[in-house]
Image (cartoon, rainbow, N blue to C red):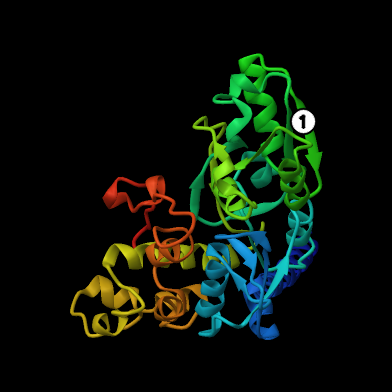
Amino acid sequence: MRKSLFALLSILLVFSVVLAGCSEEKTEESKAKSQLDAIKKRGKLVGGVNADIPGFGYVASDGSYTGMDIDITRAIAAAIFGDPEAVEFRPLSAEERFIAVQTGEVDVLARNTTHTTSRDASVGLAFAPVTFYDGQGMMVREDSGIKTLKDLQGTRIAVESGTTTELNLADQMRKLGVTYEPVVFDNQDAAISAYEQGSVDAFTTDRSGLVSRRSTLANPEEHFILSDVLSKEPLAPSVKDGDSKWVGVVSWTVYALIQAEEYGITQGNLDTFMDSEDPEIRRFLGVEGDLGEQLGLPKDFVVQIIKAVGNYGELYDRHLGPDTVFDLERGPNELWTNGGLMYSPPFR
């Protein structure tokens, strides 16, 4: 009896050791499978972006990409490689973007994408911090006589498929008791073309997108954006869910942009902060501590981000601020210290 019991215990012990070994191997394997490791091995970041929204993601006449989301993608590349050009941009439509993330075609999606419950829970995205707080709006012609959403009774409204705008439009019109005809397009270029040609009466998308699109029309002054806001649209970069290491890199890159503005650190004055005696700033810039290594990044990853694109305020002003055709007020996109919503957790 004792011999049998001893033999059984011995077998269980061996089995448990084998399982423990397998578990450790799986843990090491899962660590190695972080997208960050794959990106480092590849030598470049692949970013899914917009190519037709001036101010956010746009291809210039010389073929270069420009916009706020483009610079955020470059900031991530700078954090990893110290080189903002170590990135390949993949222009994606609204319908293509989620599949591109799910299949691994892109490492990160920075393409005017709203953080919602379903995209978090069922689409399989993991969102980084919000980079632009927006809201859905409506653009109409100045001579249309339309001043409010209620005036849209019986009209045809252009909307892009695969976006939150379709449902938001239906919800708001239903609440107001307004009957309308939604005209759905596969992409925003087609929608805005139909609007400009007059085959639809109005065009709806994020308010920032309306400001951007109006600037591309032949006669921008003949169109205006209603004051009504149909929804909340917190726009944020996202990655494939299930990789906390990679989510952390993208998230802390965004936080670094925000915190740099709060500290007053810019591309122009960065060097003057490198000798700061402030322990928080020294830790932030990687002069002290190992925050970069904890994320799997170089010690000076924040320095590389600021050198590459500046701080959040610089990004905003460069692409959307008073010296641009958009002249968008910061509003909720101001720092929390100025009454806005932009806030970074401590770099500690």
Dot 1 falls on a residue whose secondary structure is strand
Residue behind mark 1? 182
Question: 296 and 13: which one is in front?
Answer: 296
Q: Is residue 173 left or right of residue 255?
A: right
Q: Nearer the viewer, residue 265 or 324?
A: 324
Q: Position of residue 225 (x, y in %)?
A: 54, 38
Query: Is 253 located above or below residue 141 in the figure?
Result: below
Residue 94 sits above or below residue 16 on the image: above
What amino acid does circle 1 point to?
A: Pro
Residue at 35% across / 64% down in the picture?
A: 259
Residue 34 visible in the snapshot: no
**Left or right: residue 267 compared with residue 212:** left
Instruction: Say which quadrant the C terminus sits in.
Output: bottom left
What is the x, y in percent for residue 143? 60, 31
145 over 271 or under it: above or below: above
Q: Find residue 19 and report its horizontal and vertical position in percent.
A: 73, 67
Give the mark count.
1
**219 and 307: which is toward the camera:** 219
Residue 203 image-quadrant placement: top right
> Would residue 308 be found to the left or right of residue 174 on screen?
left
Residue located 76% across and 66% down the image:
104
Q: Position of residue 249 (x, y in %)?
A: 53, 69
Q: Residue furthest left?
A: 277
- 198 lies left or right of 169: right
Residue 307 visible (yes or no): yes
